[in-house]
Image (spheres, rainbow, N blue to C red):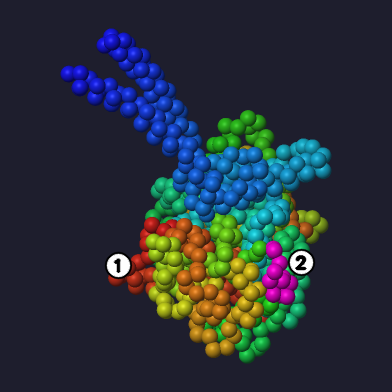
Amino acid sequence: MPKRRDIVAIVLIVLPWTLLITVWHQSTITPLLATRKGNPTAFSADGQPSGWCNRDIVEVVRTEYVYSRPPPWSDTLPTIHVVTPTYSRPVQKAELTRLANTLLHVPNLHWILVEDSQRRSTLVSRLLQETAVNYTHLNVETPRNYKVRGDTRDPRIPRGTIQRNLALRWLRESFRVNSSQPGIVYFADDDNTYSLELFEEMRSTKKVSVWPVAFVGGLRYESPKVNTLGKVYGWKTVFDPHRPFAIDMAGFAVNLRLILSKPQAYFKLRGVKGGYQESSLLKELVTLSDLEPKAANCTKVLVWHTRTEKPVLVNEGKKGFTDSNVEI
Amino acid sequence: MATRMKLKLKTVFVLYFMVSLLGLVYALMQLGQRCDCSEHDLPKDRTISRLRGELHRLQEQMRKSDVTKQPQKQPAKPTIFVITPTYARLVQKAELTRLSQTFLHVPQLHWIVVEDSPHKTPLVTDLLVKSGLTYTHLHMPTAKDRKLQEGDPSWLKPRGVEQRNEGLRWLREDRRAQPGGDNQQGVIYFADDDNTYSLQIFEEMRSTQRVSVWPVGLVGGMKYERPVVEGGKVVRFHTGWRPSRPFPMDMAGFAVSLKLVLANPEACFDGEAPMGFLESSFLQGLVTMDELEPKADNCSKVLVWHTRTEKPKMKREEALQAQGLGSDRAVEV
């Protein structure tokens, strides 16, 4: 009997302590571990507790939004250099307008707009000036033998290649390899749709990061295949998944340092098979195992390869019904 | 000895009981609080939250510097109520995303999204919540005989009629309940989810007293359609298609003041109207041509474009689905 009582006594003594210790362990140890892993930077100098929930910050950002002006430049955020080739057609101004409306939300963004034209057009120049986005306006004309004839989408003729290469060259001339300014380079076509989350995902690119893209390759979306270790090992596409990099232009971003350290890497102009343009650049820069998957290990779609219909202008007739002085 | 032991044990028990009770209370308090998110915090998420914190700090800085620069309070701007009918298709999320990115730049904007659906879809619900905009989420299915079938050309049946009317109905009901009654400032604009809007058009329409009009690009088979203005008044319409309509313009080419809509509770879109007369069916009861207010520099600038998005080619997806290997449906596109 006394033995039983002793056992009961011991159990009753030990039980509350174990309860207490597990509760205390859960609530206090993990934040301590978390702060030790992360680097105490300017964030903690704010005086905010390191356990601050994401949701609070996002909500505060919403209510204090400033309209029609890019967010203030931060010294700690890497700059995102967005390279957009563009060419003159009826929907150009509309496309660039809505792309500018999107980019205007992204902090530390530098828009490199490269026109496929002999000289910089007033339409684009004026649009860039009015929009207040931080930009660089370049232009280079695609030689006639490369230009797409009519509308036929011949994939062998690389579209926008010369313009993107010019942007790469401009970046290499403007930034030194040893410069401490971190940057990310992203090739954004003017008719795609980009979510704001995408730009924050790509900001942490160390070499080349990748993510899924919707409406390419005749699928709902194409995406890289990511294994349980978080490494890319293949491509979930139907159209030629054995390409070295079976990814769309909108599906990857490159760290600026990598671009600067490999000055020979450009998009190949001649002899590029349809769908191999991205590979022609990426194989000079990185190997498959170096790719960093973003967008929740490539399970979220944050960019859509939308295409705008060519507007039907039948009523313009031969002489043009509308006043050509009015810019559209 | 035994009794002293007993006593000691009793106090120990009581002590431990109190301590464990306190521990339980503490644990329960922890449960009630907001999650500190640190267990779920992956390094990437933490980077995002750190960057957002930076952003917040910078915006605070800028706001402080703004406040010291500008003199205080401007009179409240009239709210722009944007009614957007939408329907589920592949590009829906992309369209609504980029539309919301434009609207996020416009102050005092209230987005009324009306889904062509018997119930609210999670895709639109989540998008609206994350958008950061002031919004109202409604839904109204289109009557079966008015719905476009697969393969029908887009002009065959009028689209978005029930949805826009539902938006108007909600607005009337909501505004009537507000203090101030019919003397409310506001502008109503019907914005389709595939068009492109510049930020200037919203500032142009804010001063609408009755109905204001402006040019629309890439519509009516032309580079742009517009009202022709002489002496500050609209005298006729420059359009390539059926110019004899009472109001030959596109949905994106006009805005109506809230006051006018509240004063005319019967005004709505007529789904039975012949092709191209949808806008006229609504405006006829509200205003006459000479009462129209021309905007956009006497209707000489194009600030909105009637763009249309291509339907993405899904041949490979369909082939895969036939084999049962379609892309993961759980991934929202």
Q: Amino acid at mark 1?
A: Gly
Give the Cα separation between the discs numbered 2 and 1.
51 Å
**Outermost residue toward the left in this view:** A1
The x and y percentages for residue B261 are 61, 43
Q: Quadrant of residue B236?
A: bottom right
Q: Residue furthest front?
A: B1
Q: Is residue A179 magenta?
A: yes
Q: Amino acid at mark 2?
A: Arg
Residue assigned mark 1: B324
Q: Is residue B288 visible?
A: no
Q: Position of residue A220 (x, y in %)?
A: 43, 66
- Is residue B299 magenta-colored? no
The subunit letter for the residue under badge 2 reads A
Give the structural element (helix, strand or loop) at label 2: helix
Please, is residue A277 above or below residue B99 in the view? below
Residue A254 place in picture, x, y as percent: 58, 69
Q: Residue B292, relative to residue A162: is it above or below? A: above
Q: Which residues are magenta?
A: A170-181
Q: Residue at x 26, y 11 (%)?
A: B2
> Is label 2 or label 1 in front?
1
Q: How far across and down, in percent of the image, does residue B223 sit?
A: 66, 70
A195 or B5, nearer to the observer: B5
Residue named by callout 2: A126
Tag 1's secondary structure?
loop
Looking at the image, residue B37 sits to the left or right of residue B74; the answer is: left
**Quadrant of the frame with the N terminus of chain B:** top left
